Image (spheres, rainbow, N blue to C red):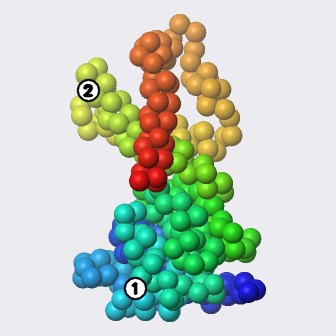
Amino acid sequence: MEIIPIPTETYKLGFIGAGKMAESIAKGVVQAGVLPPSRIRTAHSNPNRCSAFESFGVKILPHNQAVVEDSDVVIFSVKPQVVKDVVLQLRPVLTKKKLLVSVAAGIKLKDLQEWAGHSRFIRVMPNTPAAIGEAASVMSLGGAATEEDGELIAKLFGSVGKIWRADDKLFDAITGLSGSGPAYVYLAIEALADGGVAAGLPRDLALGLASQTVLGAATMATKTGKHPGQLKDDVTSPGGTTIAGIHELEKGGFRGVLMNAVVAAAKRGRELSQS
């Protein structure tokens, strides 16, 4: 059967699952002007979740089947442990005319395609900074997803941050880095602030400086295109304060610990996806 293109100027977007990630994506799409809220729909049993979507104009339908039937692009944004049941339940209405997307961590494309009964599926791994439009997302296209489908999803998720494309087999490692990575950075911010307090700074000032320093450094890395090693060297003058601090980090195995954290999270993601 020939794949029918999604009408890019008029398509409707449906969310199965109306949690925080779905809300972040929907809000980003609306705020970026990618879609008007009138072309987005969802359903949920919790009135508070429905109100959150209604507050910026998203249409609330009575149940998930109605969302699928009234949408051209369907994003599954439910907890990983219920994805299979939800997709199988909706399978009769998941036709090949519809582009299906999953943001559920740890759920492989081959399983999603098997449950849906066809392979017009795209897997996306966003992360929590989607809530402020700064997500690091990665997508992988299923067997029947077209390049046009991929461009459409890249535009949608590009509205809440940056998006890359990678093979599905890399997603456990992606989960370990960008999926879990924000938590590592929060720990680093907290530790930097604690160091400031230990050195005599008031808590509020220390936390503000630590947060802005991490933001500024990350922005330098993304905007200058310089290797982080070069940026580090630019701050590190001979016999100065920075190299003294870096020496302590190296003695503590700072880089090795971060590398191990990513590898451990990736390993756990692999275990969960196989269970």
Q: Is residue 208 left or right of residue 234?
A: left
Say which residue label 1 marks: 64
Q: Which mark is residue 183?
A: none
Residue at screen point 57% across, 14% down: 237
Q: Earlier in the sequence, mark 2 or mark 1?
A: 1
* Observer able to see residue 95: yes
Q: Is residue 100 left or right of residue 128?
A: right
Say which residue label 2 marks: 197
Secondary structure under tag 2 reads: helix
Quarter residue 143 falls in: bottom right
Q: Mark 1: which amino acid?
A: Asn
| Label 2 to label 1: alpha-carbon separation | 50 Å
Q: Position of residue 203 (x, y in %)?
A: 24, 34
* Observer able to see residue 39: no
Q: Are marks 2 and 1 in contact (CB under 8 Å)?
A: no
Quarter residue 229 falls in: top right
Q: How many marks?
A: 2
- Quadrant where the N terminus sits is bottom right
Q: Mark 2: which amino acid?
A: Val
- Which residue occupies the foreground of this view, 12 or 237? 12
Residue at screen point 50% across, 92% down: 70
